[in-house]
Amino acid sequence: MTNTLTKWNPFGELNEIQNRLTTLFGRTGTRYNGDGDLGIAEWAPLVDVTEDENEFQIKAELPEVKKNDVKVQIEDGVLQISGERKMEKEEKGKKYHRIERSYGSFERSFSLPESSKPEAMTAEYDNGLLTVHVPKDKAAKPKLIEVKVH
């Protein structure tokens, strides 16, 4: 039985805590292994969700993701955007010193409100930006319920 000594790196531990916290809040980042090497991390595309009187709009940043690698669907009132950003093929004569961008599969899900009309949803993809339009159902008006206070 042999015991090995390992070098303690407090910054590696701080980075691991940061990675765990960002994952807890739904964001992932580049992993640091404590030896100065960076690993490839999972990623979740950034999105903006907006609403106006006619529709809900979801914009997702998908840099370097091909249109054919993106899937948009609605199931049980949940909008799902999924796909994959593929890593560049290693080229002969090219050395990689640092890889900070994340690659791999991703999935983002959003619950749609009852006032949405998912069957009329449309989407467009242009230059790495996915825009999903979910029209509002004009018949589904918000109901005002007055509550008497005693």
Image (cartoon, rainbow, N blue to C red):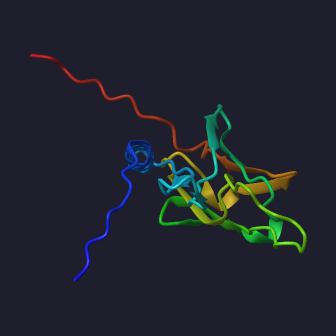
Q: For the view shown, which residue lies furthest in the right direction?
A: 93
The C terminus: image quadrant: top left
The one of 144 and 122 positioned closer to us in this rendering: 122
**Residue shown at the point (51%, 37%) measured from the top left:** 141
Residue 26 position in % (x across, y down)? 46, 49
Q: Is residue 86 above or below residue 16?
A: below
Residue 64 position in % (x across, y down)? 81, 58
**Residue shown at the point (26%, 78%) measured from the top left:** 2
Indicate left or right for 129 with 5 as reference: right
- Residue 33 shows in this picture: yes
Residue 25 position in % (x across, y down)? 42, 44
The one of 97 and 104 positioned closer to us in this rendering: 97
Q: Residue 95's image quarter? A: bottom right
Q: Residue 88's image quarter? A: bottom right
Q: Is residue 13 above or below residue 74?
A: above
Q: For the view shown, which residue lies furthest in the left direction?
A: 150
The N terminus: image quadrant: bottom left
**Residue shown at the point (82%, 73%) measured from the top left:** 89
The one of 118 and 37 positioned closer to us in this rendering: 37
Q: Is residue 61 above or below residue 121?
A: above
**Residue shown at the point (82%, 55%) measured from the top left:** 125
- Residue 71 shows in this picture: no
Q: Is residue 118 above or below residue 145?
A: below
Indicate left or right for 59 with 91 as reference: left
Residue 30 position in % (x across, y down)? 57, 52
Q: For the view shown, which residue lies furthest in the top direction?
A: 150
Callout count? 0
